[in-house]
Image: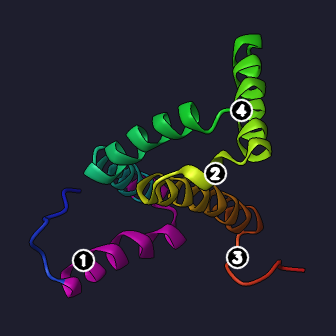
Amino acid sequence: MAWRSGSSKYAVVHNISEIYRPTINGYREKVLEALKDKADRAAKSELAKKIKVIKGFYTLEMAPPVSDNEMKKLFSDLALVKEFIQTGCYKFITVKQAWLLFLVGTEVGLWFYLGETIGKMHIVGYKV
C-alpha cells in the first residue's frame, strides 16, 4: 500500500485503521507489509543518514585508548598537566588560553553529565 506524503491526518488514521482492523480476522500480511514499508522509508530518511554519520564519529572519538602508543600518549599528557600545575605556569597564561581551558573542562564535565543521563535513562533521578 502506497502512502501519500500530502494526505491529511484523518486519511492516514483511516488507512491505518483499515490495515490494523483485519488483523483480528487473520490478515497479518497487510500489517507486515505496511510495517516493512514504514521501516524502509525510515531507514532511507535524512535523520537515519545523520544518525549513521554521528554513530561513526561517536565510536571513533569516544573509544577508550587501546594500543600501547595511545596509553603512552595519555600518560605523557597527564605528566604535562602535573608539571604545569606544580611549576605554577598557570599564572602566566593569557585570558584567551584560560578561556579555552575552561571550555575544554566544561566539555569534559558535560560528557560525564550526558553519560550519566544516558546511563540512568532519566534526567532527574534513577528509576528504582
Number of other residues with Cα within 10 Å of mark 1, as a class: few under 14, some 14 to 19, many 20 or more: some
**Numbered circles on residues, count:** 4
Choose mark 2 or mark 3, whichever is in front.
2
Instruction: Give the mark nearest the N terminus, 1 or 4.
Output: 1
Q: Identify which residue is drawn at 58% across, 62% down.
A: 106
Towards the viewer: 76 or 67: 76
Give the image quarter of residue 34. bottom left
Q: Which residue is at the far left? A: 6
Residue 80 is tagged as 4
Q: Which residue is mark 3?
A: 122
Q: Which mark is residue 90?
A: 2
Which image quarter holds the N terminus? bottom left
Magenta segment range? Answer: 9-30
Query: What type is the residue that disc 3 sits on?
Result: His
For the residue marked with disc 2, what is the amino acid? Tyr
Q: Residues within 10 Å of mark 2 (few under 14, many from 20)?
A: few
Q: CB under 8 Å between callouts 3 and 1?
A: no
Horizontal and vertical percent position of residue 82: 79, 39
Real-space Cα separation, disc 2 to disc 3, in angstroms:
38 Å
Q: Is residue 120 above or below residue 78?
A: below
